[in-house]
Amino acid sequence: MTTPTDFVRDQWYVVASTDEISDIPLARTVCGEHIVLFRQTDGTIVALADRCPHRGYPLSLGAVVGDEIQCGYHGLRFDGCGTCTWVPLQNNIPSRANVETYPLATTGPWIWVWIGDPSAPDPDKLTALPWLDNPDWAEVHGMEPLAARYSLLIDNLLDLSHESFLHAGLIGTPEVALTPIETRVDEDADVVYVERHMESVECPPFYSDTTGLSTPIDRWQDIEYHPVGCYILHSRVAAAGVVPRPDGADPGAAHLTVLYAITPVDEHNTMDFWALARDFAVGDSAIGEYLARMNREVILQDVRALDLLEQRLAAEDDPSEVSLKIDTGALAARRMITRLAEQAQTPMPTR
Amino acid sequence: MTTPTDFVRDQWYVVASTDEISDIPLARTVCGEHIVLFRQTDGTIVALADRCPHRGYPLSLGAVVGDEIQCGYHGLRFDGCGTCTWVPLQNNIPSRANVETYPLATTGPWIWVWIGDPSAPDPDKLTALPWLDNPDWAEVHGMEPLAARYSLLIDNLLDLSHESFLHAGLIGTPEVALTPIETRVDEDADVVYVERHMESVECPPFYSDTTGLSTPIDRWQDIEYHPVGCYILHSRVAAAGVVPRPDGADPGAAHLTVLYAITPVDEHNTMDFWALARDFAVGDSAIGEYLARMNREVILQDVRALDLLEQRLAAEDDPSEVSLKIDTGALAARRMITRLAEQAQTPMPTR
Amino acid sequence: MTTPTDFVRDQWYVVASTDEISDIPLARTVCGEHIVLFRQTDGTIVALADRCPHRGYPLSLGAVVGDEIQCGYHGLRFDGCGTCTWVPLQNNIPSRANVETYPLATTGPWIWVWIGDPSAPDPDKLTALPWLDNPDWAEVHGMEPLAARYSLLIDNLLDLSHESFLHAGLIGTPEVALTPIETRVDEDADVVYVERHMESVECPPFYSDTTGLSTPIDRWQDIEYHPVGCYILHSRVAAAGVVPRPDGADPGAAHLTVLYAITPVDEHNTMDFWALARDFAVGDSAIGEYLARMNREVILQDVRALDLLEQRLAAEDDPSEVSLKIDTGALAARRMITRLAEQAQTPMPTR
């Protein structure tokens, strides 16, 4: 079933990229929670509940004044801790006038927000993404809004057979849907692995135009999915027959780490953050721009398909599905998400 | 009351015209059921449930490949019987992956789909429309979508007094609303007849521009309504005083059979298929185009009025009505539709 | 809480301005009731229920014929008393075919409609607005539709501290939010008074461009709110230090009476009628146009803010508020509205 899972709390979700944050307030919604982000004078990024406690006006429609944000309706001010520091015509400020802050974490260009108990953000739940901070790699990134529940994007990404059909001509070649996959599930670490190794296949323009490789190539797609919001696709392309060295070094191949951060907005909307990190043509920004443009085209094909699918699913009362072998990874992901959601609802043990 | 009747099943409804069907899939919704239509290489028209059983993606967003339709998401293929013939990466195809087919029938340019028990389409329930296939008659046709429940269109068509007001200047003249009507109801055959014979009246441009007649004319409007989806208006115009011969032949008059096929889409939408068959100017395609253009203008006046009425009715909680004598036919039609809906819900007798 | 109060009946609400009414029917909705207004040949303005009793078609889509309105669908006619005078093809007209009329009252350019028991319109509930009819004063007026519940507009108008933030640069100067207010509530007469007297403050362009005054000025804002639909702001500006004479005459000041008629349309929409009456530059229509244009800009700032606030409130399940001292008047207004709503539901005593 693809009915929306309740949002999983006690999780990090990407809320924005650092280059989106300035002294102009940015409004974002994550798991149904309205958040306003802004940058203080020393560069610190602040995330507050985007709702003035006075009459509910969005703080994001106000202005940043120094290190504070001021409501655009009646002028209430809030500092970076969410403390209300000014209201009109009275000196004693009610403590109820403070707003909630959101814990943040940063990885490369991405800002993660902790949705859950604000007093207990768990750094261990942040998946390491070293490619985003590694000077030997180059990255490009973006975000596309999706008018579809986030589970549809997870289904989509966990099986890439659809590349042959939905993305034919861009990254899809017939071989994708014809090459067997191997799915592994690490229930302890909460990771789903789906691997597809295509040998001696067509080289799509996405790679021929950027790596210097040409048909035939070996093309590996090794997926790691870390529920809820973090998806890593290790894409390796090399001339057919070229394999990594016994020590793991792989100088003859081009590596592209395709990252998706899947952020639920509300029951029917999702933010699809993406980043591409490459170890080839690292200094060539034109190749970065080409990859970004092509990847965005691919994502827009997904967006159109999933938006249409959402409209159907939201209206129909027939939620029947027929799962196939290609869905093994997606089904494992759904089970993990259900379990994580249940865990997040378990009350913390009292000491 | 004009609240939407539940859709009447075990009925034929026009779903498309034959010229709309090609090897590009056509999506239509009838009585809330999503249907995809396409043409096979030998010309056969196929109608399948427009929902891939895998993840619910509309098949109409895919492509026709030979005699099959292929899902645009993961490539599943279905033949003209709805049998799934291919899924990615597995040989044994689950039988649950098949999709439902819809029985079809064709009359002239119209394709009827059987909504109800797919194993028991009833050819006796198809109303004969000989004018659409008769080489001595010429026809033009089209369809306008209506953002209104289908019962509003039935109300509209069963009493033509409204022509004097809503269609003033086109087909409406003051005499329509001033000429008495005769209503007969055949409860056995499920037909409503409403007849209005105007004598020595104004000839509207619709007829003066196409038949050579001029004021005064005799103008007869003889309606046969076959619930749910089939409406026939026998329009006869002749110079005032000219009557049919005792044997029924009527060479001195021009005859236009105005056909409407009323197809419920969902609770608030309807397809208004129309066809005009004439026994005059049969070889003159310019006159056919003129009649089609004028009739479409008339229908668009109905569309605008009924769409606005639907918006009001859908929002209001006052469903009160005051029925007049002019509504006798429409009220009989409503009773018949209610009875047909009840019959369709009656389980078939077990042998 | 700002959830929509049930509409308060047995009240006058402004429905239109007199210059909007002609022999073209005007459709308006007040407190959820659809009303059609038109002008008869002798100039009398008529307001009827905008729903043909036959099949529910809006009468406002029909035409005025002489002193009657004719339904655009089947031609039923109604006179100024709502009596049905014609139906097609029958002489005896059912009395159920009559429509309700609405009592009206006129003050200056405004037409008030009585929402409640149509047999008992209460003239004592009309607030006198002498500035609109006084030849020594000049007025300009308009209306802006608001996609927000009417209670948000009342909250907005009952505290003008927001001028410093939402209307900064137009009528808002920093001093507004820094000057204490005095709130008085007359529970017997159902009036809320909120007064703010700013002394020796900046003169905003709104006044410097129209009165010849310049900074510093004394600027008084004396609000009278007569629930539900009538709000009066007595704005007095004068050179700093100039006060009214002991006898109340105030020749050294410019007076602008800013009137708002707040008319609920439905649960999420409101009509914001406004009028500005001035005792300065009375013969200078260019100044009237300037004030109208500036006031409309100010109102559009409110419209944008309240429309956004409505979207948030309509979607969220957190209706929490933190009320401040500036809200004293608004809270009193809410209590009065609740009491008036309860009174209107009390059945009239039987004699």
Image (cartoon, coloured by chain):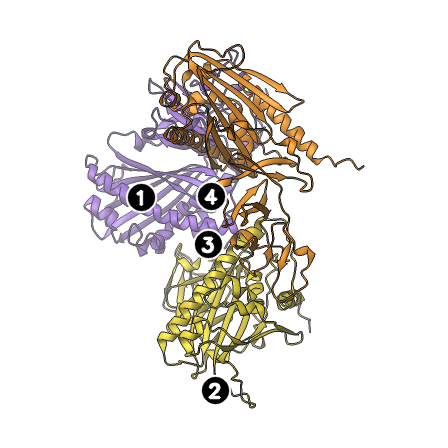
Chain colours: A purple, B yellow, C orange
How far apart are labels 2 and 3 at the CA level?
67 Å
Left or right: where C181 falls relative to B319:
left
Which x, y percent locates residue C244? 49, 12
Q: Disc 3 vs disc 4: which is toward the camera?
A: 4
Chain bearing mark 2: B
Q: Disc 2 vs disc 4: which is toward the camera?
A: 2
Which quadrant is home to the C terminus of chain B? bottom right
Amino acid type of the residue that numbered disc 1 sits on in the rendered structure: Arg
Q: Disc 2 vs disc 3: which is toward the camera?
A: 2
How far apart are labels 2 and 4 at the CA level?
65 Å
Which x, y percent locates residue C90? 65, 66
Q: Disc 1 vs disc 2: which is toward the camera?
A: 2
How far apart are labels 1 and 2 at the CA level?
68 Å
Amino acid type of the residue that numbered disc 4 sits on in the rendered structure: Arg
Q: Which mark is residue A324?
A: 3
Per the image, label 2 sits on a secondary structure element best described as: loop
The quadrant where residue B226 appears? bottom right
Residue topped by disc 2: B251
Amino acid type of the residue that numbered disc 3 sits on in the rendered structure: Leu
Q: Are marks 3 and 4 on the same chain?
A: yes
Q: Are marks 1 and 3 on the same chain?
A: yes
Residue topped by disc 1: A296
Contact check, label 2 and label 3, Cβ < 8 Å: no
Examine the rendering and report whether any part of residue B231 can be seen: yes
Q: Residue A149 carries which label?
A: 4
How far apart are labels 4 and 1 at the CA level?
19 Å
